[in-house]
Amino acid sequence: MEPGFLIDHAHANMGTEQEWVEGDLEKRFWSGIRTKGRERFGVRTFRCTRCGYLESYALTPLT
């Protein structure tokens, strides 16, 4: 396992895929969160139809 954080780009009712970004969260004053030069992956979530349990995976690299 490696450290990282999730980014949710939803804005103005326009949903987009969540992203997992490697490393620790580093906030910037003007630009929000630093992601430049870090690996990013699309997040896929699966739900159990019986109990509702969720599991998320970050398998697909984003460019």
Image: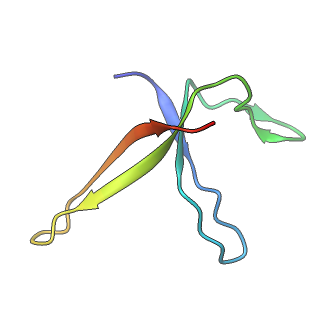
Q: Is residue 13 above or below residue 62?
A: below
Name the quarter where the C terminus is drawn.
Answer: top right
The number of numbered discs placed on residues in the rendered structure image is: 0
Position in image of residue 46 (x %, y %) = 27, 58
Q: Which residue of the protein is positioned furthest toward the left in this rendering?
A: 50
Q: Residue furthest right?
A: 30
Q: Splitting the image into 4 quarters, where does residue 51 fall?
A: bottom left
- Residue at point 34% right, 55% down? 45
Q: Is residue 18 above or below residue 2?
A: below
Indicate left or right for 39 with 51 as reference.
Answer: right
Q: What percent of the width, then of the height, locates residue 47?
A: 23, 63
Q: Nearer the viewer, residue 59 or 21?
A: 59
Quadrant assignment, res 17: bottom right
Residue at position x 74%, y 32% from top?
Answer: 34
Q: Is residue 23 left or right of residue 34?
A: left
> As drawn, is 43 to the left or to the right of 38?
left
Residue extending furthest toward the bottom: 13
Q: What residue lies at 64% left-to-right and 25% top-to-bottom?
A: 38
Whole-percent x and y of residue 5?
52, 37
Image quarter in which the N terminus is found? top left
Is 15 rendered above or below residue 55? below
- Please tell me in which quadrant of the rendered image residue 36 appears: top right
The foreground one among 30 and 56 is 56
Is residue 29 positioned above or below 44 on the image? above
